[in-house]
Image (spheres, rainbow, N blue to C red):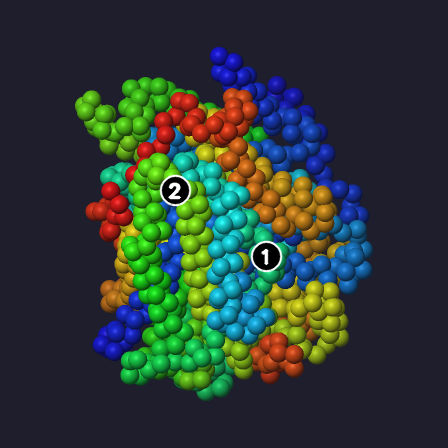
Amino acid sequence: MDPLLLIEQSLNGFQLGVMLFLMAAGLTLVFGVMDMINLAHGSFYMVGAYLTATFVGLFDSFLLAVVLAVPLAALVGVVVELVALRTLYGRDHLDQVLATFGLILFFNELVKIVWGPVPLRLTPPEFLAGQVELIPGAPYPAFRLAVIVVGIAVGAFLWYLIGRTRLGMLIRAGASNREMVTALGVDIARIFTAVFALGAGLAGLAGAMAGPILAVEVGMGEHILILTFVVIVIGGIGSVKGAFVGAVLVGMVDTFGRVLLPTTLKLFLDPSTADGVGASLASMAIYILMAAVLFFRPRGLFPAHG
Amino acid sequence: MAGARRRKIALACLLGFLVLLPPVALAAGEPFYVSLFTRILITALAAASLNLILGFGGMVSFGHAAFVGIGGYVVGIAFVHASDGTLFLGLLPGTVSGFVVLPLAMIVAGLVALPIGAICLRTTGISFIMITLAFAQMLYYLMISLRRYNGQDGIAVWQRSELPWPIDLDDRMSFYYVALAVLLAFLYGTHRMVNSRFGRVLRAAKDNERRVRALGFHAYRYKLAAFVIAGAAAGLSGALLVNSTGFVGPSYLEWHRSGDLIVMVVLGGVGTLFGPVLGAGALMLLEEFIPELLNGLADGLGEHWKIFLGPILILIVLYARRGLMGLVDGSLGGSLLRRLRPEPPPGKPPRRRR
Amino acid sequence: MRSLILTAGAVALMAATPAAADELKIGMITTLSGGGSGLGIDIRDGFMLGLEHAGGSLGGLETEVIEGDDERSPEVAVQLADRMIERDGVHIVTGIVWSNLALAIMPTLARNEVLFISPNAGPSALAGEGCSPYFFNVAWQNDNNHEAMGQHVQNAGFERLFILAPNYPAGQDALTGFQRFYTGEVVEELYTQLGQLDYAAELAQIRAAEPDAVFFFLPGGMGINFIKQYEQAGLKDEIPLFGPAFSFSQDILGAVGEAALDVYNTAQWSPDLDNPANARFVEDFVATYERIPSLYASQGYDAALLIDAAVTAAGGDLDDTEALIAAFETAEFDSVRGDFSFNTNHFPIQDFHLRQIVQLDDGTLTNRLVETVFTEHGDAYAQDCSM
């Protein structure tokens, strides 16, 4: 392959990874801190995208729309936490799966009732609509670069928040020993609500940033949910660093699987078989990656604590 | 104990209901319910097979639908080759004989489960959930890539498996009793297995694997055996399901379907013999009738049925702690009481944190 | 015991006999929730408008439409078909959007001798050797719109094409159909993943291959993802994009916006097709549902009109299935697409047009007719059908 194309595809894989990281960061946080499997994370992502699209339509400003949509998504998260999920923290993972599965059904239908079944329109803002020629001969969409910037900023913010602030310290303490933190007179329930809100807000941000690139439609959360779980399991549940590395790994493997497998297989098989098998193998690639990682490192690449 | 007696009475009622359903439904002019409950029984078999490993062995497989799909594809592929007279892999002729395809579905699903289980069982907890999902997804994409068998479109199976007289799967009553018999046989087998030495080791390994090992048992082998048996039973369920729907495709192996099976087991009551049957019945009946019920209330409301199903599931999780079997035991009031108290429910150790 | 069961069975048979013959029951199985529900709802709404225009009854019979949400799952579709046939006694099933669902329910329908009037899915598996007397398609055979685009691209003189579709049978049908009429060079034939989100890698491949044009078939959300990303990559002005109507139908245009402006696509119908039936359909659809009808809505509408015409021709007799099938084969109705007739395999023979995306004064995007590509076009599989 042409080296320039190789670099371009690496950038594509990295960018896909960062987009997955935006989604995975919130999920791994909630999972790691509260030991809570939240399938409804994808619903907050969908709500974030829909709200952003709506506000762009109202105010004609992408930035303002994101600034409004992200806290609203977090607020939706708080409501869900208070009404349904907070009683599930100590419960079996299976109960959490069942309840949050119920939430998915609820939110998909709610969004359909509020916004209608037809996909919404959301495009990059004017100033990010063009391309930047990073690699000679391969102009790169400016908005995708913005996604990379936002993703790295979120990573840095979380690293600072968790590693360097008092709230972060309490979060870490609450994750490893809930009783101890409570005994110290800290209201652990409030902290958990705050973490859940942060997770939902991050999912909303992911929706806002993915919306201009992907279809804003009912069920958009599930398309990306499984991928996100793959990412955080590879990275190690609860680890933000792991989520980042896992996301980039998945992005790279997926991108290069799609690019290389069909072409490689055409060397051995007839073109029509190669196309079919190649496309399927490319789809399988990330699952093979996950199975391999879990086989050798059952707790992921960067186990969070303990 | 009152709870145990209540449970016995409830189960006798359930069995009586299941045995008498076809003649009553047919007499009432509602043949549809025979077909519907045939499907419920077949799905209950898949859920019960998942319960064997999930409920009794603590192995939360998020890829169980893959084995249902494998069993279904055995019937589908055998049908394709029987109808066009070609050989599978240039070796085996096709067939629609139930005596061949039904056992074959179990064997093939079990054989696929063996290596997958061997690898997955080296992990536990959430890793096990995700690695089983990974293998199921691989099999799903494998089926999509099978162009010979129509990829994503799947196989329309126009002919049901042939079994000797008096069994005739084309007759809905006959098919129903086959499904019921298979399910009851599997439940009986599960009951025997769970209460045998095998089952005790399995259940002990669920609670404390290290102690089992210290006692000299290879927990891994017992778990793997259970995983393979569950896979084979799921394969049989798939083979029957194809006969019921006349169709098999990659959608049988989708992760949603594995999720549905987990939902059924949890809904019915994890680790109870009849829980999965109740869970499968409840979920499928809810899905079947909520839309109609809503349409009866207001025109066009049925379209939005999932906005009601979602909260119903949440309420069940919140208030019926041990699933529907918990309700049968009369613990609804108890679980409400327990919710007001901070301690965990009796008899169930608090889940250890990682 | 056996005789008791037999008696019970006989009672059941009598009781299960479909309702009085002057009532027509139609099973509307379509996708009403989750991804892709926009298409199902369009088909359903189009059908209901057709029913209204036919005077609230089809074929002069009191008509009941029983709705079911298939959730885009073949198993659920089969289950619904089962229920509607066995319990509700429907005479005709319609509504299905997706080919794999249509294929899944056919054994059940054929076993019960119930007709399926497909308002969308037209897989090749049901058009050739596998054709069924119980299956009628009132939209197109899957290949048709792609064939028309192949012809147009050929006529327009493009010589190096990059073509892509998802890795499933309808995707293979699409690329096969396209290449049946486009005979120039194909620099790359690419199969993408079902439900794929990100196309950056494919776009880089397209740019590197330097084709004259790109032909793509990516229905629903995949198409929205692709078109948005194609435009953002700056490819739209460099390499012209072509696709079948599914890639640029009304439901997608709203979501992709100007990224689709000026692009050409092919279809058997367009909102501005000039005939009285279409004018009435479009006007009333906009008035009733406050949106421009999509291709799918037009097909749902035609399904209702077809059933109306056929049942009328059969004299309202729903019990004689053979006569009913014959009535469908020769049914004449004012299709919103103009001339329409059935081929020997129960798929349409009709015209196909080139359309272009334009922007209306109020900012909405929609399709405008450019020219006719095929007249009285059938499909390539009819010759293999033995009906």
Q: Is residue B131 left or right of residue C261?
A: left
Q: Chain of mark 2?
A: A
Residue C170 can be seen, yes or no: no
Extreme residue toward the bottom, this view:
C157
The image quarter containing residue C387 is bottom right
Quarter where residue C329 is shown:
bottom right
Q: Which residue is mark 1?
A: A112
| For residue C272, above or below residue C69 | below
Pick the residue in front: C283 or C319. C283
Residue C210 vs residue B152: left or right? left
Residue B318 shows in this picture: yes
Callout 2, which amino acid?
Answer: Val
Q: Residue furthest front?
A: A185
Where residue A205 sits in the image (x, y, percent)?
44, 62
Question: Which residue is pictured at 60% across the width and 76% down the height?
Answer: C365
Residue at image coords 36%, 56%: A25
Residue at numbered disc 2: A186
Please state which of residues C247 and B84 is positioned toward the viewer in this rendering: C247
A221 in relation to C250, above or below:
above
Q: Quadrant of residue C340?
A: bottom right
Q: Secondary structure at mark 2?
A: loop
Q: Earlier in the sequence, mark 2 or mark 1?
A: 1
Choose between B78 and C46: the one closer to the eye. Answer: C46
Q: Is residue B185 above or below residue C348?
A: above
| Amino acid type, residue under disc 1 in the picture | Lys
Foreground tag (2 vs 1): 2
Distance between the alpha carbons at the discs numbered 2 and 1: 40 Å
